[in-house]
Image (spheres, grey):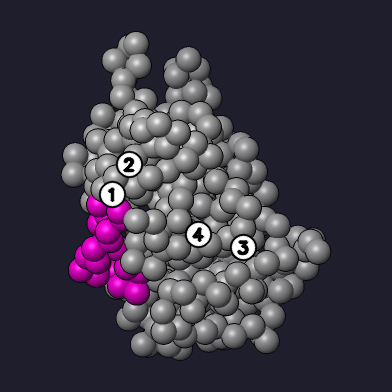
């Protein structure tokens, strides 16, 4: 079963859709999978997940999980976390987690310092180094495995000051035994770490817009406000994951982010007037929109350089 664009928007606008409260991330994920299982587009999954959420935490989770689905294309969907950052950062030379050969198996050792959703994750994608190539550059591989393997220890971190329902944690890996099929093909940094930033940005943005559409419908915002959010979402949905590395994608994303900021300024009074409790949570959580703003600006400027011939 697939949905047409029209059917998707009809579903999104339905007043019969209930925005749910959840006691845990696994409870939320079970509902998210159920409601989106027949939707092939991960961007539509993210937007619908946001529409079904009554706070920004679960809207973000919808975007994050949809981004993982978009990039890694697993055989079936599990609550997953991407494990990249270490104490020195997330650049290739900062990745010290090591994967070494032991007979037919490999052993993973090291630690990760900041993992979104680590405490509830069923599945992990972990960046590790296998040494250096002939140009003295780190060889980074992406590993994929269940989170309950022997030798993995997850520690919970204090909640962030925004989206506190999303847990974060650290991880240590001690002699975690992996097989060759758990090592994804290709360069782990180029094929997975670097593109995930764009996959996450686009999917989380779609989820946030979906969340605000849900709030607008439930709180009877003006028709103009709903229409503006729908139009903004419609400009994101045609983007194809295979083209996320193109300069035009980064410019569309930058334009949508700018338009959303304007929409927020124009409609937050309606949010506050109709749902004061929800608005206070939104005001706390919308700091999420400013995360990595410097990196967004750099990627946008680079995209313009490429299009104008300065980046060749």
Which badge, 4 or 2, comes first in the chain's sequence?
4
Q: Which residue in the protein does label 1 denote?
A: 173
Q: Does the magenta portion include 156?
A: yes
Q: Which mark is residue 111?
A: none
Q: Is 48 left, or right, of 122 in this rendering?
A: right
| Nearer to me, 302 or 201 | 201
How many angstroms separate mark 4 from mark 2 (CA)?
24 Å
How many angstroms separate mark 1 from mark 2 (CA)?
6 Å
For mark 3, does the 10 Å Cα neighbourhood hold few (<14), some (14 to 19), or many (20 or more) residues? Answer: many
Q: Which mark is residue 45?
A: 3
Q: Which residues are magenta?
A: 151-173
Q: Is residue 158 above or below residue 20?
A: above
Q: Is residue 41 visible?
A: yes
Q: Which mark is residue 108?
A: 2
Which badge, 1 or 3, comes first in the chain's sequence?
3
Residue 76, percent from left and from top: 62, 58
Which badge, 1 or 4, comes first in the chain's sequence?
4
How many angstroms separate mark 4 from mark 3 (CA)?
9 Å
How many angstroms separate mark 1 from mark 3 (CA)?
32 Å
Do residues under tags 4 and 2 come within 8 Å of each other at their CB atoms?
Answer: no
């Amino acid at each position: 079963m697939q949905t047409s664009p029209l059917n998707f928007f009809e579903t999104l606008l339905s007043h019969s859709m209930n925005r749910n409260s959840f006691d845990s991330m696994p409870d939320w994920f079970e509902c998210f999978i159920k409601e989106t299982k027949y939707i092939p587009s991960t961007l539509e999954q993210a937007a619908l997940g946001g529409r079904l959420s009554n706070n920004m935490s679960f809207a973000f989770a919808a975007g994050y999980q949809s981004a993982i689905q978009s990039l890694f294309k697993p055989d079936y969907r599990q609550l997953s976390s991407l494990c990249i950052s270490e104490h020195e950062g997330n650049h290739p030379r900062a990745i010290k987690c090591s994967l070494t050969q032991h007979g037919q198996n490999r052993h993973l050792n090291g630690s990760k310092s900041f993992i979104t959703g680590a405490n509830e994750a069923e599945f992990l994608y972990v960046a590790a180094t296998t040494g250096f190539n002939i140009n003295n550059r780190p060889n980074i591989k992406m590993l994929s495995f269940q989170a309950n393997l022997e030798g993995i220890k997850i520690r919970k971190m204090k909640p962030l000051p925004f989206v506190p329902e999303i847990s974060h944690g650290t991880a240590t890996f001690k002699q975690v035994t992996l097989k060759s099929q758990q090592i994804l093909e290709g360069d782990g940094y180029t094929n997975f770490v670097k593109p995930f930033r764009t996959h996450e940005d686009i999917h989380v943005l779609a989820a946030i817009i979906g969340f605000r559409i849900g709030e607008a419908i439930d709180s009877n915002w003006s028709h103009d406000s709903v229409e503006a959010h729908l139009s903004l979402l419609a400009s994101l949905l045609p983007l194809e994951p295979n083209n996320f590395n193109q300069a035009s994608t980064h410019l569309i994303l930058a334009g949508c982010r700018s338009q959303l900021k304007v929409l927020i300024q124009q409609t937050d009074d309606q949010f506050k007037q109709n749902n004061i409790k929800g608005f206070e949570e939104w005001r706390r959580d919308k700091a999420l929109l400013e995360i990595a703003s410097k990196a967004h600006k750099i990627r946008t400027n680079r995209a313009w350089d490429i299009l104008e011939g300065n980046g060749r």
